[in-house]
């Protein structure tokens, strides 16, 4: 393994990356090797210890993720790894320390360049795969629950897809905060979802929303909906007065053809219309990247991830890892994640020769 601390000169190291060349099935992903240049000013080299498969990568390979780069590019929304080199202007003391970073693309690689300002520390003793599982998922769940919906202890919420990466994290954060959770999931996951403290409802049942209404006849304090599409209105109808709908995805339209931005823009319009109604309820579309230009944005991410990782370290939040699959077998990892048969998040780890 070629690693070194770099502040000047020309140093390169070989990097293996998973490239999506165009609109392909998972088996169409390409493994490429190239030389990684030395980090520029303000950058570090991060040796990947864990990255993951999220809905973002699933949509990007279809060319359907909102604001994705043009093909070809390297997949990988987020990463946990150890700094192996620093560029000019970066504290060399970062070398050997573990950090998390959200990259949007580029993390499915054995090594990658990351801006030092975007690094978030991972506490000693927290497994890299565990930290990766709750990185974007944990920040997303924390911000939706505590910064947007602001559900108080004793409240009741609905989590669609309670077996998923965000869903299973959101369930645990809510239960730790003293909130009752109704969660939708396939029957195969009901035992596990119930063990997380959730009342499960079968999302295949055509009367799913009626079942939820029976469980919470006075309405719920918040609904967290990653599905979108026409059923988003039914999620809205579940709310009590003062309740909050948080939409954070458009999974219902993942296979639709046409403009990839249209489902998101349609959701924006519907949520805005509902917010204009004088009924005391509110609707939001959660966007992880909203406010990135604000000087406090990165500080909020660090603060929220710290809260989440502290709960992991204390055993209050158990990351749901569906599988650990080597980088060179990323196609299998993507296929498994897209199968909708897993509980939690599929994690990509280094190949043995890169570990």
Image (cartoon, rainbow, N blue to C red):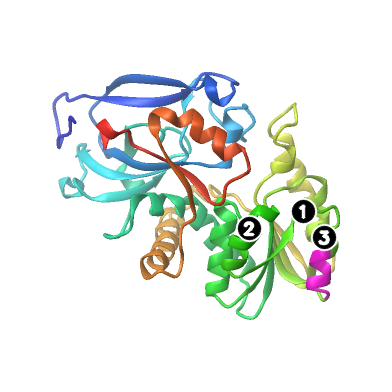
Q: Is residue 158 above or below residue 320?
A: below
Residue 273 shows up from this direction: no
The percent position of residue 225, horizontal first and vertical second, equals: 70, 54
Please tell me how crowded label 2 is: few (under 14), some (14-19), or many (20+) other residues with Cα within 10 Å.
many
Q: Are marks 3 and 1 in contact (CB under 8 Å)?
A: no
The percent position of residue 205, horizontal first and vertical second, equals: 81, 54
Disc ID at residue 272: 1
User: Is 216 covered by the magenta stretch?
Assistant: yes
Nearest the viewer among 113 and 210 is 210
Q: Residue at x 77, y 53 (%)?
A: 272
Q: Quadrant of residue 67?
A: top right
Disc ID at residue 162: 2
Q: Earlier in the sequence, mark 2 or mark 1?
A: 2
Residues at marks 3 and 2, CA–CA distance in whole angstroms? 15 Å
* Magenta-colored segment: predominant secondary structure: helix
In the shown orientation, is residue 196 left or right of residue 124? right
- Magenta segment, which residues? 211-217
User: Disc 2 vs disc 1: which is toward the camera?
Assistant: 2
User: Is 296 covered by the magenta stretch?
Assistant: no
In the shown orientation, is residue 71 left or right of residue 123? right
Q: Is residue 116 above or below residue 70?
A: below
Under circle 3, the secondary element is helix
Disc ID at residue 84: none
Residue underneath mark 3: 209
Q: Quadrant of residue 304?
A: bottom left
Residue 92 shows up from this direction: yes
Q: Are marks 2 and 1 in contact (CB under 8 Å)?
A: no
Q: Residue at x 33, y 58 (%)?
A: 126
């Amino acid at each position: 393994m070629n690693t070194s601390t770099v502040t000047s000169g020309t140093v390169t190291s070989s990097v293996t990356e998973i490239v999506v060349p165009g609109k392909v099935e998972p088996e169409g992903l390409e493994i490429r090797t190239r030389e990684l240049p030395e980090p520029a000013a303000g950058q570090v080299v991060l040796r990947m210890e864990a990255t993951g498969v999220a809905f973002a990568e699933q949509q990007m390979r279809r060319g359907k993720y909102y604001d994705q780069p043009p093909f070809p590019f390297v997949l990988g929304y987020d990463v946990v790894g150890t700094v192996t080199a620093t560029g000019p202007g970066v504290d060399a003391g970062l070398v050997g320390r573990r950090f998390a970073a959200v990259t949007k693309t580029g993390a499915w690689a054995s090594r990658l360049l990351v801006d030092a300002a975007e690094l978030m520390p991972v506490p000693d003793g927290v497994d890299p795969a565990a930290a990766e599982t709750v990185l974007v998922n944990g920040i997303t769940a924390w911000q939706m629950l505590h910064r947007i919906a602001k559900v108080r202890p004793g409240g009741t919420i609905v989590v669609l897809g309670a077996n998923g990466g965000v869903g299973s994290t959101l369930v645990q954060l809510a239960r730790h905060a003293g909130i009752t959770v109704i969660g939708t999931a396939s029957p195969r996951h009901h035992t596990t979802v119930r063990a997380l403290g959730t009342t499960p409802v079968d999302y295949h049942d055509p009367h799913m929303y009626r079942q939820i209404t029976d469980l919470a006849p006075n309405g719920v304090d918040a609904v967290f909906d990653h599905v979108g599409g026409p059923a988003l209105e039914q999620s809205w109808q579940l709310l009590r007065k003062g309740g909050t709908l948080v939409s954070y995805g458009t999974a219902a339209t993942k296979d639709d053809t046409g403009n990839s931005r249209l489902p998101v823009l349609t959701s924006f319009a519907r949520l805005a219309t509902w917010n204009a109604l004088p009924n005391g309820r509110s609707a939001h579309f959660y966007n992880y990247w909203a406010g990135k230009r604000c000087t406090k944005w990165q500080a909020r991410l660090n603060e929220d991830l710290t809260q989440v990782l502290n709960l992991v370290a204390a055993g209050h939040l158990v990351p749901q890892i569906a599988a650990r699959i080597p980088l060179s077998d990323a196609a299998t990892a993507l296929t498994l994640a897209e199968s909708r048969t897993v509980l939690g998040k599929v994690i990509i780890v280094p190949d043995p020769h890169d570990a």
